[in-house]
Amino acid sequence: MSSDQIDHDRLFKELIETYFAEFMQLFFPAAAQVIDLKQIKFLQQEIFTDITAGEKHQVDILVGTRLKDEPGLILIHVEPQAYPQKEFNARMFIYFSRLYEKYRRKILPVAIFSYDQERDEPDTFQIGFSFLDILRFQFYKLELKKLNWRNYIHSNNPIAAALLSKMGFKSDERVPVKLEFMRMLARMKQDPARMELLGGFFETYLKLNQEEEEQLYRELGKIDQKEADTIMQITTSWHEKGRMEGKVEGRMEGRMEGEAIGEARAKQDAICKYMVARFKVDPAGIREKVQHLTDRDVLDRTLTELFTAGSVGEAQSIIQNTVGKAVQ
């Protein structure tokens, strides 16, 4: 999926609204200490018209909350920015002024720069003369590409896990980043819906190719077996792959049928990768057997049984027996 096809605003909005407290605690701890993050309300998106440019702009995330030691409502405006934009700092000020005009409340503005280039973005907007300073407006900024991903891999913060995919890493670090993301998910034990949210966000921005996936599962075979088993039960990658393959094939063969085919192939792939990572078996031989399994429930049960197998022989027996029943 190209960058132009990705709805960056929707992805960041869903992630931050789900983990707003964790977002503030991780990146803006000084503010998080004095803001009552237990009482937050997401307000309706505001749309402002730029009369000069003839454009409409939408405030992405607007939160109503309070300070712990002060009465009265405050607002937090979070603006994700997926591409460089001239005079973005001026736009932040315009948003601020429009929001203040409407609400007449203290407002904390936050900008998230998520594009792939590493740039020095201003966090102030100033107006003045040589003889008089008229205005100095400042906002929090988060430049994801400038963050070292390794500094966040020991965190139990789900926001840190998802945003590894947008931090600063080299092209040859894609597999280690994905591995550490999966290890973080395994530690956090999020519910399935949130696990899917985190995985979907991550893989939108860091999707491994087939060669990298194979390298990833070789690396999984080198870590603690119990941890590897937990990671293998996290179906983020192959569920996402199943949905995407299903959508493609669905256009040709009917949506429901296509999604079923895609999910079945993804589950077959998960079984193969688990056997390679856990028992170091030949992937071609396993793939030849599991391709006979097309029922998604059967594939799910097979994978669950494999997690309990104590030896390669026991695992191969599970697959052989399941395939035998399927082809009868």
Image (cartoon, grey):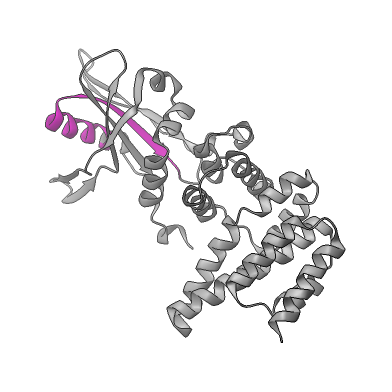
x, y (%) of residue 120? Answer: 45, 33
Task: State the residue in front, 284 or 133.
Answer: 284
Residue 138 seen in the current view: yes
x, y (%) of residue 145? Answer: 52, 39
| 59 is higher (above) or lower (below) than 219 | above
x, y (%) of residue 313? Answer: 87, 64
- Specify whether residue 100 is painted magenta: yes
| 277 is higher (above) or lower (below) than 263 | above
Q: Which residue shows up at 53% across the image and 71% down it?
A: 245
Instruction: Answer left or right for 123 relative to 319.
Output: left
Residue 172 seen in the current view: no
Instruction: Answer left or right for 208 relative to 14.
Output: right
Q: Quadrant of residue 279?
A: bottom right
| 291 is higher (above) or lower (below) than 212 | below
Q: Which residue shows up at 36% across the image and 17% down it?
A: 34
Q: Which residue shows up at 20% across the image and 20% down it?
A: 72
Q: How many marks?
A: 0
- Specify whether residue 16 is painted magenta: no
Task: State the residue in front, 145 or 152.
Answer: 152
x, y (%) of residue 297? Answer: 59, 70
Q: Which residue shows up at 46% across the image and 35% down it?
A: 143
Q: What span is in magenta? A: 91-114
Quarter of the rendering occupied by the C terminus: bottom right
Instruction: Answer left or right for 131 relative to 243.
Output: left
Task: State the residue in front, 278 or 98.
Answer: 278
